[in-house]
Amino acid sequence: MSAFQAGIESNFCTEVNTALRNRDANKLQSILLLEPPFPPVYQQLIDSLKKKFPGNDSTAEKRLEDVVKRLVTEAGEGEDDDGRPIASWSPMVTFLVGWMAFIRDINIENLLETYERLSDLQQKANSALQHPTKGILMLPTVVGYAKVFSRVAIGLDKHPELIQHLVAASVTDEGHRDTLPEKAANVVRQAFIICLNDRNTAPGGIKAGKPDGKKVGIYKMANICLRILFQADKLESCQTIFDNIYNSSPPLSIYPASERVTYLYYLGRWHFAETNFYEAQLALQEAYDHSPSSPSCKSQRRLILIYLIASNILLGRFPSTAIYTLPEAHDLRARFEPLTRAIRRGDLETFRRITDLDLSHEHAAWFIHYRIFYQLGNYCEVYVWRSLFRKVFLLSGQQGATERSAPTIDLHAVLVAFQYFERRAHMTPGMAHADAGPGRRHITFVLQDFTPPPSSGYIDPDFDGVDGLTPYIKTPDILEIESICGSLVMQGFLNGFISHKSKRFAITGARKAGSALLAGFPNIWEVISKRKSQDVHGWRKQALSDTGGGGGVIRLSGARPAGS
Amino acid sequence: MAATTPKKTPVADPKNGEAAPEKKPVAQLEEDDEFEDFPIEDWSEEETQIPGGNTHLWEESWDDDDTNEDFAVQLREELKKLSQK
């Protein structure tokens, strides 16, 4: 069939060719629409395709390809302005044929089929993006398609009944099961890698202070990948994206604010999940500081702030009342303040209630929803210990009998305090209030994730129901308190030494510091921030020294001849 | 990884053989945790300013020296038992 006979198909091809000749990437994107409802002229194209190039005709694709090849001359071999040959761009032809087949066949009623067709088209678009000089014209189209594709993938992930049959069929050789969102992220990742590895750019991928070539798309594509992986709860799959960016991206600071803030939000959350709370705090604080304060961006600011507050609490830095008055912080005080109050006081009982693994506390479901519950429960306990040691010192510590003797804390007094609060934590709030019940359990016992029998003691599940068994109840003992004390000293949160013989903790440096409290109980935030670097994996702050991106510089000056 | 632990529904756990305290309503979770696209692509530093500035957002020194509030009084009573032994 000649191009003339192809009628409206020819018109589209000519339009595309004009956009390519004019190097107008945005025009190209505006032609290659993806989502219904389509304007009338597209409907005519679809009707014509169905009639002349139907999907059930095995020759249709080949015939369409001939039309595209003939009219989209920009996809053929050519020469640039300096007479240098330009390689042909056959993936562009394949993509354009794929696009026409896509709009001809799309049926958005069937989400799974739409996903599969989109995945196929996205891969074809990615291949077209790969052309060293012309590929960049596809960038806006690829970004736009990836956004639609990611929405469909996330939508499907939320309807597992539609994709159940795919799960079993997708086990790899290593036995790893790539879920549908992971596969979708892998498709988008191809485009990300093409942008990252573009060598047809100014040195370092920077031109006049802006990203050059396809590198302009690095964070756009990365953020789409990250959105899919986060929505599908596949944070462990994000690592390679952060590795790649850290190893070969131009600095983040030269990208538009929306891309920077979105990227740092995901990076901060990933570090949080990896328990790198200091790195999380740095990334999230930067994201927060640079997000727009306009009311239209309140939801983004709020999400950043929730993780920023959680990270800071985990580093021993608490939100001020000023934070809680911000519009995006609505309701957050009620969530976080009971926790910080318990840490401040050394109130182990309240802390246990808030972080109880049976999720019975009124805010537990909210903390779980944002995936910050276990981190706060596990890592803040140490700070409660420190505060409780401090409170015991305030109430019963000895300042040292003579000029030369150190202030000390009786570890038996600390033991009494721990036992008192652990005991109360296992009573119902009503009982604890009356301080009546005998229920006693041990710290490590509480951390077991199971439902304790009503007696509050422990019976091994294998023996559950056997008559005449006494539940196992362990209370903190002096050895445990000594061990906790040692752990606090090792972490730098207590300053002094333990006298194992007299079971006392002695504070050192009190006279020099001017007070036993200052000397004995160092500021947690200062202790942690002093030993941390400002470097955050995944956050490229300075330009890399090599050119064109990718590959480290190998210095040969120190190399010795082979065999020497 | 803790962050990916499946969501659980709160379970009432009877302790010490007592009936669980009446269950508080489950926290409102209608908030979406998807980070939406920003409505604009780029903006200036001025557009990120918040009233009062970004300083004083965090308290680094928060130690509680109060020995007269209920919590401390309770603990002091408990510690007294030790010296009476």
Image (tube, coloured by chain):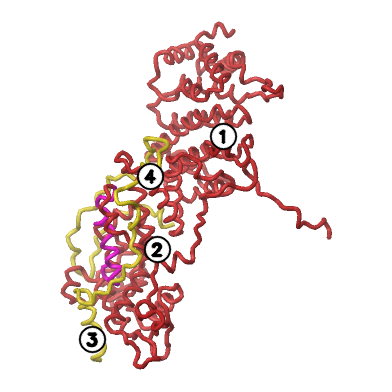
Chain colours: A red, B yellow
Which is more toward the observer, A80 or A443?
A80
Q: In x, y percent, where is residue A137?
A: 55, 27
Would residue A28 appear left or right of A324 to someone viewing this image?
right
At horizontal 30% and vertical 72% (from top left) the residue drawn is A346
Q: Chain of mark 3?
A: B
| Residue for badge 2 | A315
Q: Which mark is residue B80?
A: 3
- Crowd around label 1: few <14 · some 14–19 · many ≥20 (10 Å): many
Q: Of discs 4 and 1, which sits in the foreground?
A: 4
Q: What is the distance, in whole Å, between disc 3 and disc 2 at their CAs? A: 34 Å
The segment highlighted magenta reads: A328-350
Q: Residue at x 43, y 69 (%)?
A: A527
Spatial distance from mark 1 to mark 2, Cα to Cα? Answer: 39 Å
Q: CA distance from mark 4 to mark 3?
A: 53 Å
Judging by the rendered image, the residue that carries numbered circle 4 is A291
Mark earlier in primary sequence (4, 1): 1
Badge 2: how crowded within 10 Å, few (<14), some, or many (20+)?
Answer: many
